[in-house]
Amino acid sequence: MYIPDMQLLKNLFENNRKWAEKIKDKDPDFFANLSRQQTPEYLWIGCSDSRVPANEIVGMMPGEIFVHRNIANLVIHTDMNCLSVIQYAVEVLKVKHIIVCGHYGCGGVKAAMDNEARGLIDNWLRYIKDIYLHHEGKLDTIKNERERFDLLCELNVIEQVANVSHIGIVQKAWAAGQDLSVHGWIYRITDGILKDLDVCITGPDDISRTHRLK
Ligand code: CO
């Protein structure tokens, strides 16, 4: 059997062994300790973009951050995948922080700004188009396309932070007195720097009455 990518994949396994050895050199029990449990304090919801790797950006080791990534870091209340991650993170791992992290130059956000038909993914990008429509008044006043794109990347994060806070699992945790905050951050690929969008939500008082659950 001929597998042309075999050589390339072999490199990945070599990299893996070097990586594991480097960690074990520093702490021989690292993996043994980690295998017993995970106690991350953070849930990261980010974009799938290969240039925005969760652990590396915030300098965290395996075991320190629970991660969910999808195109354009969306939190959709009918997405079983994302909801299951949030449920496990909040109810079992009892994370203290949920971080929605977007990034400037997001291809998903960019794609939602034009009228190209791309097939299946249009259904996913639709959520970003809805955000555009919601903020059309403000966005359309910005003539500079780059600035308009940057703002939509930020607005998308802010909307997703709100979406997280509206989820029943999150509201239930607050009602039970659980310490849980939802943050909105944005990452700039061109300089590797994170920015806090200052939209932190720490309890039901911060969310709209329409979405508040008893
Ligand atoms: Co992206």
Image (cartoon, grey):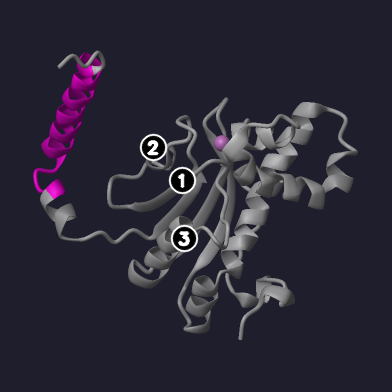
Q: In the rendered image of this protein, does residue 176 appear above or below residue 52? A: below
Q: Residue 67, how many percent across, how many down? A: 40, 50
Residue indicated by mark 3: 80
Crowding at mark 2 (Cα within 10 Å: few <14, some 14-19, many 20+): few
Q: Residue 56 carries which label?
A: 2
Q: Which amino acid does label 2 sit on?
A: Glu
- Label 3 secondary element: helix
Looking at the image, tell me whether mark 3 or mark 2 is earlier in sequence order: 2
Q: What residue type is labelled 1?
A: Arg
- Label 2 secondary element: helix
Q: Residue 69 carries which label?
A: 1
In the picture, measured across the screen, residue 182 lies left or right of residue 26, that is right
Q: Distance between the residues labelled 1 and 2?
A: 14 Å
Crowding at mark 1 (Cα within 10 Å: few <14, some 14-19, many 20+): many
Q: What residue type is labelled 3?
A: Met
Q: Residue sitting at 47 percent across and 73 percent down?
A: 179
Q: Residue 117, how many percent across, how many down? A: 69, 32
Q: How far apart are marks 3 and 2 (CA)?
A: 27 Å
Does the magenta portion include 14? yes
